[in-house]
Image (cartoon, rainbow, N blue to C red):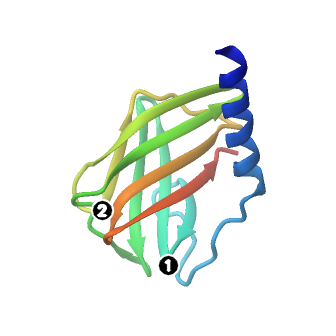
Amino acid sequence: MKMKHLISVTGLVLSCLSMNPAQAHGDAKPQHGGIVQKANDLSFELVAQADGATIYLMDHGKPMASKGITGKLTVLQGGNKIEADIKEAGDNTLRVMGVKLGKGDKLVAALSDVGGKSMTVRFTIR
């Protein structure tokens, strides 16, 4: 069981390292002091907080509604893997509770129903 977990974590880490972030149009500057990544012409800004994180959604620089969007956040902290639910939190925000993020963490947000599509967004806390 331990070997299976190690292989899973190693595979996830390698996939995070080998993926290049998608480039899209629009402004990539953080508006809330977080980390911005782009996928499918959308911007996702992750802001780490003491009790979790907030993800802000933008479509070409304008807030995008988060209604109906759900997902799972996978956090890789060294050899540890933590998963937490992503839930809509009103307007253009998604919320993740119960995770403590720190420097060097690699995050994968697997989102469902983003404009009718599923997508994956990767972040690294620097």
- 71 lies above or below 19: above
Left or right of 52? Residue 102 is right
Say which residue appears at 40% left-offset and 71% top-offset: 58
Name the amino acid, label 2. Asn
Between 118 and 53, which is closer to the camera in this rendering?
118
Q: Position of residue 17 (x, y in %)?
A: 76, 51
Q: CA distance from mark 2 to mark 1?
A: 15 Å
Q: Counting residues from the N terminus, which is met first, the one under dot 2 or under dot 1?
A: 1
- 61 lies above or below 126: below
Q: Position of residue 108 (x, y in %)?
A: 56, 47
Q: Position of residue 38 (x, y in %)?
A: 55, 69
- 49 lies above or below 16: above
Quarter of the image that includes the N terminus: top right
Left or right of 69? Residue 57 is right
Q: Position of residue 30 (x, y in %)?
A: 53, 63
- Graded by Cα atoms within 10 Å as few (under 14), some (14 to 19) or many (20 or more), the crowding at tag 1 reads few
Dividing the picture into quarters, in which one does residue 57 lie? Answer: bottom left
Say which residue appears at 66% left-offset and 37% top-offset: 105
Q: Secondary structure at mark 2?
A: loop
Left or right of 120? Residue 95 is left
Say which residue appears at 56% left-offset and 33% top-offset: 101
Q: Which residue is mark 2?
A: 92
The reply to whether the C-beta atoms of the residues labelled 2 and 1 are less than 8 Å apart is no
Name the amino acid, label 1. Asp
Between 82 and 59, which is closer to the camera in this rendering?
82
- Graded by Cα atoms within 10 Å as few (under 14), some (14 to 19) or many (20 or more), the crowding at tag 2 reads some
Q: Which residue is mark 1?
A: 41
